[in-house]
Image: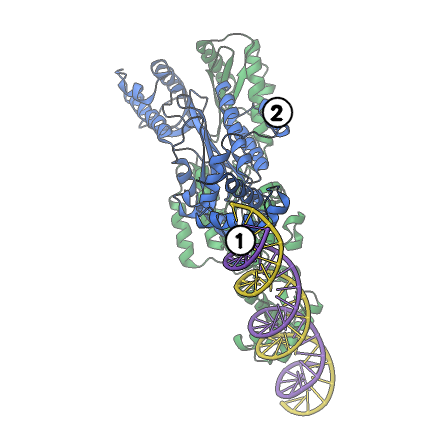
Chain colours: A green, B blue, C yellow, D purple
Amino acid sequence: MLSERRKRILRIVVDDYVAEATPVASNTIAYNYDLKVSPATIRNDMAFLEEQGYITRPHHSAGSIPTDKGYRYYVESISGDIELPLAEEYLVYDLFQRAEEEFEQWLRLASAWLAYLVKNMAIISPVRTHQHRLKHLGLVALQDFVSLLVLVLCQAQVRKQILSFDKRITQDELTRLANRLNAAYSGMTSSEILASKTKLSLEEEQVTKCLVDMIDAEDRLEYGKPYLEGLCLMLSQPEFSSSPKMLSILEVLEGGDWFRHVSCQRICEGETRVIIGGENTEEALQGFSLVISQYGMPEKGSGLVGVLGPKRMDYVRAISSVNRFSSLLSKSLAEYI
Amino acid sequence: MLSERRKRILRIVVDDYVAEATPVASNTIAYNYDLKVSPATIRNDMAFLEEQGYITRPHHSAGSIPTDKGYRYYVESISGDIELPLAEEYLVYDLFQRAEEEFEQWLRLASAWLAYLVKNMAIISPVRTHQHRLKHLGLVALQDFVSLLVLVLCQAQVRKQILSFDKRITQDELTRLANRLNAAYSGMTSSEILASKTKLSLEEEQVTKCLVDMIDAEDRLEYGKPYLEGLCLMLSQPEFSSSPKMLSILEVLEGGDWFRHVSCQRICEGETRVIIGGENTEEALQGFSLVISQYGMPEKGSGLVGVLGPKRMDYVRAISSVNRFSSLLSKSLAEYI
DNA sequence: TCTGGCACTCGCCCCCTTAGATTGCTAATC
DNA sequence: GATTAGCAATCTAAGGGGGCGAGTGCCAGA
């Protein structure tokens, strides 16, 4: 258990290092913060904090920087008082007032704003649903044997697929076929469609198979390709001042595998999770911190919203921003269809 | 007019600098290439080439590197003998054999391959058409007053738009409405739809207006968001060894404006244009070279395929690859619907 | 016109030194 | 027992000089 003063010193070390990106010296703490003790005392406390693994030093005669454990302690300790500055609160509110148009298009914009707020990379994944329902299907003749199957799902997503028949079918026949299937399947999930024991013609059978596959594929889909914004903001941080470091994170991001790791975090509703450095199971991300939350609702579909940046990150700002975006995104999503 | 030997030396300077990324010395040329003259003679020729502005030196006692003019001369001189190595020719051919699925999805893959071939960034823009024709339209009720208009265009592109009516309309009514409009408009361009003097109900009028707007928007569309691959390949080049350089090109690319510059190049069919360094009108791209071509056909739609990289680029490889991709993409596009 | 020779220039690397920052420790003080 | 002052020890970063090597420019001669 840390004494109050040691807690305070740890907190100062984190705050100062986050702000300045340089190791924090005992003198700096003594002069800039009114701790009512001498630098020597602070040194003693810092030695203790180092011994306990909360802080470390880049080299022998340097100031200290927080370890993962130090950041973790810091994050746990702040989780009460996290509020976005009022001016920015208004900015975000205003942004969300204008949420309209294509919801998915708009997510990109929101992502850019989040990035701008936290000066790091923002991640917003499009909404995913687990039990898609068919709203409507259309069949369009493209060539003699080839048609286009167009699906409208219940959240107004549109999907298409090319379909080849064994015989020549006219557009009229296709339209009648589509009407019959719409009447039979509208509003159903893929399993309900399979369960409905309707007698089907050969072509109906074929279309049904195709659409069930498409809905299944949609259900199985993990979180889709996320909107990533603020890459340059993040790379402007001193952590990436050398080009190999920059290149290595770019390679990780280009790969796309990293997002699988992010999305397999099981996050409870309303929770904002902070993953710090080595806490990442994905090795490539162990120099980074991730602040991530879920928006939406399980039944209506949900997505991820988060911030990725170096471990030296303004956690208060990141957590409060992600919180705010998560709840506002949920609200917008609920209003959208 | 340059003598044969001077031409040859210029060509060697470009080749060597492209390969090694270090200034080329007269000795290097004398030892590695059988010019049958001494380094001193080569020096004299290089002094001439420098005086004429084909090459320059980073500093007084350094070897030479090509100027924009030097690269330009080089590119003009090679435009005859550009062939992809046979092994890679097969690779590309094989890749295109498997061109199926979603054409647009597949463009991304092609882009990654092109990037890999040229070890720089590849750009492939999706196909754009100027006179879209309506293939089919569908209307799906979402809520009492709100419907989804789904358009299928003649190249199997699907577009959607939400539509609000002034009165409550059932799905049945919507279906009948869609059927009437399909019968009237199928296969037409937006201007043909406007010209057709059919008597319309209020709702038909509204849907017609909406779909004409959508087709118009599609017609007006510039080249869409291109598939960019190979960012890390390009950034691995020694040109970007310092992080500010890396950051500055990333900022340019993130902005997206640069592509407007690329796409406003008017490129003739079958031509592959090379834009070197300062020849770029966009200031941010003046350190870069662009090899760009058009694929497709004006009537059926066309797109851009190109390579972006530092001026020190293997132009032979870039030009031949872009050529090859352009013609194969045209072929695939012609087969695709 | 070409060549060999040679002086000259310049960047780069290495090493050394110095200055500055910061701690760790010890002994004295509250 | 906690705190403090003082001081030596340690380490980094920055600056300066010197030597090396690469490469040219030029001149005189073939």
Residue B272 showing in the rendered view: yes
Compared to A111, does B217 lie above or below? above
Is A173 left or right of A212, judged from the image as shown? Answer: left
Is B16 left or right of D9, judged from the image as shown? Answer: left
Q: Nearer the viewer, mark 1 or mark 2?
A: 2
Q: How many marks?
A: 2
Secondary structure of the residue carrying numbered label 1: helix
Q: Position of residue A4 (x, y in %)?
A: 62, 72
Label 2 neighbourhood size at 10 Å, few (<14), some (14-19), many (20+)? few
Residue at 42% of width from left, 42% of height from top?
B258
Residue at 56% of width from left, 32% of height from top?
B109
Residue A307 showing in the rendered view: no
Q: Which residue is mark 2?
A: B94
Q: Position of residue A327 (x, y in %)?
A: 48, 47
Furthest-top residue in view? A167
Compared to A80, does A228 lie above or below? above
**Residue contact at pointers 1 and 2, CB within 8 angstroms:** no
Compared to A254, does A241 lie above or below? below
Compared to A109, does A217 lie above or below? above
Residue B262 lies in quadrant: top left
Circle number at residue A89: none
Q: Which residue is mark 1?
A: A235
Q: Position of residue B21 (x, y in %)?
A: 57, 48
Secondary structure of the residue carrying numbered label 2: helix
Question: Label 2 sits on what residue type?
Answer: Asp
Distance CA(mark 1)–CA(mark 2) = 38 Å
Question: Label 1 sits on what residue type?
Answer: Leu
Q: Chain of mark 1?
A: A
Q: Position of residue C10 (x, y in %)?
A: 53, 62
Is B212 left or right of A19, judged from the image as shown? Answer: left
Which quarter of the image is occupied by the C terminus of chain A? top left
Is A229 left or right of A95, judged from the image as shown? Answer: right
